[in-house]
């Protein structure tokens, strides 16, 4: 059996340990935390959305960066293979809205438990609270090869492990408190490999408007969003979506915001605006008819008391302020022009995006080791023999819905 060191005991690292052990290797997982799967534990709000039950073509459509690189890995190990694998370990799964797959228990700890149990059954060595200081590379017959890894134990004792094979599964930079501090990307640079600088992705957005603080905690469902940027002095629609969002003390979050963040980083300095259609199911004409009906029922009330059936209570004062209509005005005195302004406020609520939150709040990292450096069929470096990369450390990222964990499973399964 051939030794192979896996640096990182997260989703990709644990899966790599299982896959390689089953292929005849003798893996050693080195993890700097005191337990495996620390970031996996908090994914999906602690429920662990471990994949998306969809076709390989749909998996690829949900990759934001470098989708072509994932073709071989996804066709070799797709979401159905992942589902069969986990069910084969005794983990009961369920599929929810958007084809998101979760453990029936809704506990990410159960995912970690079945992976850990499988690693033990395969006699995979696990070194916890051990930090990898670096990866040594030498020259062999005029080509670069891995020679070993330098490690430091929790008692500060340093050790050298000679090995010709290393898998880097250190993750990205998101949620650094879980140990994802960009080590693998740093080592790749030190070894002369090209990397894309990491950026936060699937991350909430910061807006200029102060009224978001008043709306903090308000969740909106079935709304549509359109992002517009000033490109070459012209307004350009750069992204749109439909679904749910959430107002926060700093701006906006929720599924349609997080997904957009992975697409919009390059437009941040281009006067980026978000337009929310609060009533996407109604045309302006239909919304006008709806308002006329509501107003007829509340004809003698003040305007501020007439929108309760149309909007959440928290949102009413904000929309009134934006519409410019006197909140104390009687409904029967509202003019057609004012009603049109109100409709525009409902169909085009404008927010100015001035930034993204940092890595501490990002679900994933965009950027990492360049895919040009890696053979997509087996995840090995094209220039350093014995060096492999799996999971988030690679410059590949996807939308929410279980796709990023599927990247971890599929890249690990591709290892040879």
Image (cartoon, rainbow, N blue to C red):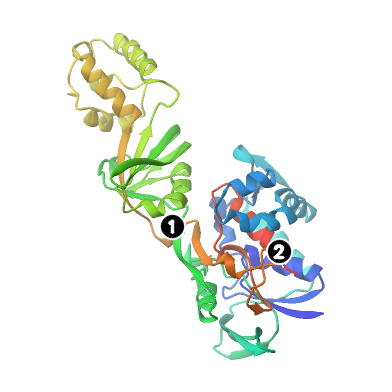
In this view, the residue in front, 280 or 71, is 71
Q: Judging from the image, what secondary structure is the residue with disc 2 in?
A: loop
In the picture, the quarter occupied by the N terminus is bottom right
Which mark, residue 211? none
Report x, y in % for residue 136.
Answer: 60, 86
Picture layout, residue 178 above or below residue 261: below
Badge 2: residue crowd in 10 Å (few <14, some 14–19, many ≥20): some
Picture layout, residue 192 above or below residue 223: below
In the picture, the quarter occupied by the C terminus is bottom right
Report x, y in % for residue 376.
Answer: 66, 63
Q: Tell me the residue that label 2 is attached to.
A: 377
Q: Residue at x 28, y 30 (%)?
A: 319
> Does any portion of residue 77 appear in the rendered image?
no
Q: Judging from the image, what secondary structure is the residue with disc 1 in?
A: helix
Report x, y in % for residue 410.
Answer: 68, 58
Q: Tell me the residue that label 1 is attached to.
A: 361
Tag 1–tag 2 contact (CB < 8 Å): no
Q: Residue at x 20, y 15 (%)?
A: 334
Q: Residue at x 25, y 10 (%)?
A: 299
> Does any portion of residue 273 appear in the rendered image?
yes
Q: Residue at x 63, y 62 (%)?
A: 11
Tell me which numbered mark, 1 or 2, is placed earlier along the sequence. Answer: 1
In this view, the residue in front, 113 or 151, is 151
């Amino acid at each position: 059996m051939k030794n192979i060191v896996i640096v990182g005991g997260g989703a990709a690292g644990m899966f790599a340990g299982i896959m390689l052990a089953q292929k005849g290797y003798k893996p050693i997982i080195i993890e700097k935390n005191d337990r495996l799967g620390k970031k996996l534990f908090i994914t999906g709000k602690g429920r662990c959305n471990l994949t998306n039950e969809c076709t390989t073509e749909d998996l690829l459509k949900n990759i934001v960066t470098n989708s072509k690189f994932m073709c071989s890995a996804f066709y070799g190990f797709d979401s159905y293979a992942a589902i069969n694998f986990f069910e084969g370990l005794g983990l009961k799964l369920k599929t929810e809205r958007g084809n998101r797959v979760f453990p029936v228990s809704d506990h990410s700890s159960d995912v970690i438990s079945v992976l850990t149990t499988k690693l033990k059954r395969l006699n995979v060595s696990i070194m916890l609270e051990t930090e990898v200081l670096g990866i040594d590379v030498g020259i062999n017959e005029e080509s670069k090869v891995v020679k070993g890894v330098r490690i430091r134990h929790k008692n500060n004792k340093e050790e050298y492990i000679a090995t010709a094979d290393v898998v880097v599964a250190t993750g990205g930079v998101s949620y650094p408190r879980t140990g994802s501090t960009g080590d693998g990307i740093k080592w790749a640079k030190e070894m002369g490999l090209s990397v894309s600088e990491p950026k936060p992705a699937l991350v909430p957005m910061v807006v200029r408007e102060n009224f978001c603080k008043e709306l903090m905690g308000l969740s909106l469902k079935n709304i549509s969003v359109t992002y517009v940027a000033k490109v070459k002095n012209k307004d350009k629609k750069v992204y749109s979506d439909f679904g749910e969002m959430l107002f926060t003390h700093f701006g906006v979050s929720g599924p349609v915001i997080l997904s957009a963040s992975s697409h919009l980083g390059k437009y941040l300095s281009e006067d980026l605006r978000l337009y929310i259609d609060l009533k996407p199911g109604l045309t302006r004409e239909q919304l006008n008819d709806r308002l006329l009906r509501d107003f007829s029922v509340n004809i003698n009330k003040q305007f501020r008391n007439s929108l309760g059936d149309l909007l959440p209570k928290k949102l009413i004062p904000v929309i009134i302020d934006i519409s410019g209509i006197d909140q104390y005005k009687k409904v029967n005195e509202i003019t057609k022009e004012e009603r049109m302004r109100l409709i525009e406020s409902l169909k085009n609520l404008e927010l100015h995006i001035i930034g993204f939150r940092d890595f501490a709040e990002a679900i994933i990292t965009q950027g990492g080791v360049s895919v040009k450096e890696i053979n997509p069929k087996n995840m090995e470096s094209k220039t350093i023999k014995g060096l492999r990369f799996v999971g988030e450390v690679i410059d590949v990222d996807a939308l929410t819905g279980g796709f990023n964990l599927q990247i971890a499973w599929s890249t690990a399964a591709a290892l040879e």
